[in-house]
Amino acid sequence: MLITSRPLDEYCGFFGLRRAELRALPGPVLDCPGGAAALVAEARALGCRVVAADPAYADPQPALLARAEAARRTMAHAMRTAPQRHLAPRYHPYDRYLRSWDRARALFAADRAAHPGDYVAAALPALPFADATFALTLSSYLLFAYPERFTPDDQLAALRELVRVTAPGGEVRVHPLHDAESRRCPHLAELRGALGAQGISSELRTVRAPGDGRRRYLLALTRHHRYRPVPWTNP
C-alpha cells in the first residue's frame, strides 16, 4: 500500500471540509491511515488537534519517508500513464501537485519528530482508542482502494471500528469508494445494510473537485440516535 503525503487542501477536497469547520470541532480528529500526510501539522496551526494512526508508524522514520518518496514516484508515473484518472494538467498542473506532496512530507517529518504522541502505530480493525474519542474521523485510500487486501467482512469490521471511536454526534467520512482502476465497490449497498442493522446510519455524498468540477463520492457514517438493538424474531 502506498504511503501518501497529502496536504490539508487535498483532505478538504476529498472530504468536503473547510478550515472553519475544523477550527469549530468540539474534539480531536482521527486520520486513519495517516501515512506521511501534513494533516496533523497543518490542523495544529488552526487550533485543531488531529491524531494520525497507521501501522507504518512502527517503522523507523527514514524507512517510512523512503516509502513515502516511492509513493510520490508511483503517483508521478500514474499521472503520466493514466491521465484519465486525474485532473487534467490545465486544471491541476502535475508538477505543482507533486510539489504539494513534497511540502506535506516535509511538514509530516518535522511534526512527527516534535509531537510523536500524535502519531500512533495502529491498524484497523483494532484501534487503541477508547469509545467516542473523536469528533470527526477521516479514512482515505484504504478500505475500498485495496479490495485485494480487504474482504467485505474486513471492510465491515473496519467501518464499525471507526464508528466506535467516534463520538455520538460526530461523523466518520470515508473516501474513495473505488479501487485503483476506478471500479466502485460492488457490494456497497450490502455493507450499508449491515451497518444499518447494527445502528449505524450511512449517507453517500458528492463533493465537487476543484478545477473541472468532477464529482467525488464519500461515505459518511453516524450512530443512530437513541439506537437500541432489538432481537430479531420470526413471526
Image (cartoon, helix red, strand yellow):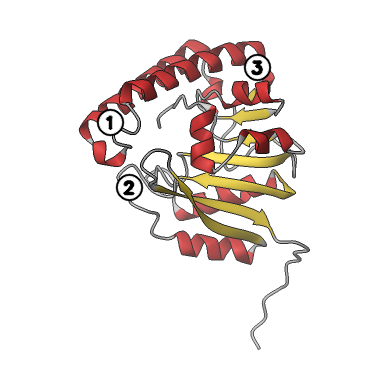
For disc 2, the marked residue is 182
The Cα atoms of the two marked residues, 3 and 2, are separated by 35 Å
The Cα atoms of the two marked residues, 1 and 2, are separated by 14 Å
**Horizontal placement of 235 versus 173: left or right?**
right
**Horizontal placement of 19 versus 231: left or right?**
left
Say the numbered circle drawn on residue 116: 3
Q: Where residue 152 sits: x, y (%)? A: 46, 55
Please state which of the two labelled residues, at mark 1 or mark 2, is closer to the viewer: 1
Sequence order check, earlier mark of 1 and 2: 1
Taking the spot 57% from the left edge, 11% from the top edge, the residue there is 110
Kind of residue at badge 3: Pro
Say the numbered circle drawn on residue 70: none
Kind of residue at badge 1: Met
Could one spot residue 120 in this view of the protein?
no
The image quarter in which residue 222 lies? bottom right
For disc 1, the marked residue is 79
**Camera-nearest residue between 67 and 72:** 72
Q: Is residue 63 above or below residue 18?
A: above
